[in-house]
Image (cartoon, rainbow, N blue to C red):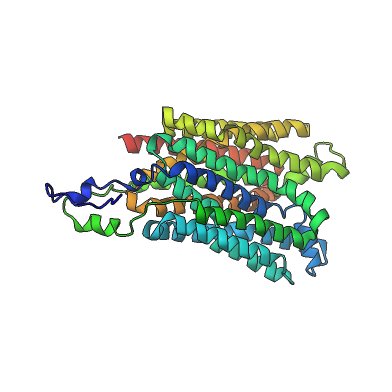
Amino acid sequence: MNQTASSPFSSGLQSARPGYAERNENYWRRNLVVCVFGSFTTLVSLSMLLPFLPLYVQQLGVSSQSAIIEWSGIAFGATFLGTAVTAPLWGRLADRYGRKPMLVRAAVGMAVVMSLIGVAHTVHQLVALRLIAGLVGGYASASTVMVGTQVPRERAGWALGILSTGALAGSLIGPLVGGVLPAWLGIRGTFFAGGAMIAVAALLTIFVVKEDFHPADAAARKATSAAPPARRTNYAIVTALLATAMMVLLANMSIEPIITVYIGGLGVAPGNITRIAGVVMACSALGSILTAARLGALADRIGSWNVIVACLVVTGIAMIPQAFVTQWWQLAGLRLLMGMSLAGLLPAISKLARHSVDESKTGQMLGYLQSAQFSGQVIGPVIGGQIGVYLGLHSVFFVTGSLLIACAGLAQWARKQQHG
């Protein structure tokens, strides 16, 4: 059906043209399914190297233990740094050329780069390829832009929660897959398998995802005097949303550098420390998987700001007792609770971000949001490690919990600014 059929009764044609979400109301469900699968497979592929990354770094010629640890951390963080840098650019291009091309670009790029990692010959090539994977990839980020702009407003929280669940499940299952596949395929073969998984997501994206995107819509809207005025951006609210998004990942990742040492101080046998640390780290992702969709739907019912403020307070409070645990299972339980409350934040923040700017800039705004999240993922371990060194391990939980509660105050202020 031709969406641009002219009307003889009004020169205000452009104001009557359906918006992007309305034009894609028949596609968003199938697109959500593909985006969830694609986010899952790409996160599995990116995180599955965690169990064997030090071994691969050693195979690439690094010999001393301290250098292996250092290069492993650099290689792992390079992807998130790359995504943080380019997410706003891809979001802006999504506004200009459509959301589907960005998904295809991310899937194809990551499938190629992931396979190339399997043929790296030096640790510098490994780091460079991981960085390129972040620069050209970002399937989960592109999915957030597509889902966040296509889904009807009243279902946005739920849909973004489902999408978040897929990504979290990939991050949780990836290390488990990485602990099994190398024994069957070898370390290099595991990267090829990861590339093949992403290639399947790329094919589904190319042939299943549908989008009704009109590149000329933005220009036409500006050209017609009858077009409705663009929504003015409230930069105070946008800043609060970006800061909160960064804090979500910062809080979750701040414990990563110290968790093995911290668990070792809880009486865990040296031979079990690595395994227990993996379980504890997985608990926050597991908690988020359990509640992301439910809290997203709750944001649709009671309002995103209410969910954001409540989840920040609960998460901040759940951080404090982690400094006083005496058994590893107590830490695991608190991390599970923390993950359950963290899960409500990103879908609610994404929903608010979508509606904080004009439709022509939603992709760019959601790109900045993804950049803030990945910045938190990069900064969190650095801050956590520094606090642990200079103030003690327990201080990491106090500082992070306090920052989250302060962020709840910022969110409350932003809510009053929006409604005031």
Q: Residue at x 64, y 46 (%)?
A: 170
Count of numbered marks: 0
The percent position of residue 347, horizontal first and vertical second, equals 49, 39
In this rendered view, identify the residue nearer to me: 395 or 48: 48
In this rendered view, identify the residue nearer to me: 373 or 358: 358
Q: Is residue 216 left or right of residue 322?
A: left
- Quadrant of residue 120 in the image? bottom right
The percent position of residue 220, horizontal first and vertical second, equals 24, 57
The furthest residue to the front = 1
Would residue 85 be seen by someone viewing this image from the given angle? no
Q: Residue at x 80, y 59 (%)?
A: 186
- Quadrant of residue 215 in the image? bottom left
The furthest residue to the top = 302
- For the C terminus, the image quarter is top left
Would residue 140 be seen by someone viewing this image from the given angle? yes
- Quadrant of residue 306 in the image? top left
Q: Is residue 42 above or below residue 414?
A: below
Q: Residue at x 39, y 39 (%)?
A: 152
The percent position of residue 37, horizontal first and vertical second, equals 58, 46
Q: Is residue 263 above or below residue 372?
A: above
Q: Residue at x 22, y 45 (%)?
A: 16
Q: Is residue 300 above or below residue 207?
A: above
The percent position of residue 359, horizontal first and vertical second, equals 33, 49
